[in-house]
Amino acid sequence: MYEVPNRGAAYKVNRKWFQEGKDCEILRIGAKGWQKGKIKLKLTVEFISDEPEFPERLAIDESEILQTESPLDEIRKIRCQEDKQ
């Protein structure tokens, strides 16, 4: 875990929120009253690029797709012939 160097009063006040947690009570649905515990903050930083993650796909002529045979085409032909018999 990365430790932030001591930055004075603000660091001392906020340290508990991120490292130790602050005492609190919550009311859960279905519980019999308040439950004591601690609340602790976690911070997530995410970078989202303006550039696409993958290069754009090359445009493929639709007729090329239609002419490509599926590995299942041969099985379909055999099955169709069997159904006709």
Image: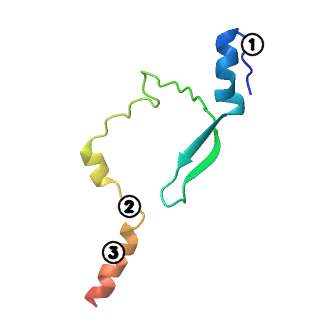
Count neighbours of disc 1 (C-alpha within 10 A) and say few if under 14, some if 14 to 19, many if 20 or more: few
Count neighbours of disc 3 (C-alpha within 10 A) and say few if under 14, some if 14 to 19, many if 20 or more: few
Q: Earlier in the sequence, mark 1 or mark 2?
A: 1
Residue that numbered label 1 is attached to: 5
Residue located at (42% from left, 21% from top):
50
Q: Nearer the viewer, residue 49 or 46?
A: 46
Residue farthest toward the front in the current orientation of the protein: 33
Residue that numbered label 2 is attached to: 70
Q: Secondary structure at mark 2?
A: loop
Quarter of the view holding residue 83: bottom left
Q: Nearer the viewer, residue 50 or 29?
A: 29
Q: Is residue 84 left or right of residue 12?
A: left
Residue that numbered label 3 is attached to: 77
How far from the left and from the top, in percent, is residue 66? Answer: 27, 53
Residue located at (30% from left, 80% from top):
80
The residue type indicated by label 2 comes to Ser
Q: Is residue 57 left or right of residue 3?
A: left
Q: Nearer the viewer, residue 45 or 6?
A: 6
Q: Earlier in the sequence, mark 1 or mark 3?
A: 1
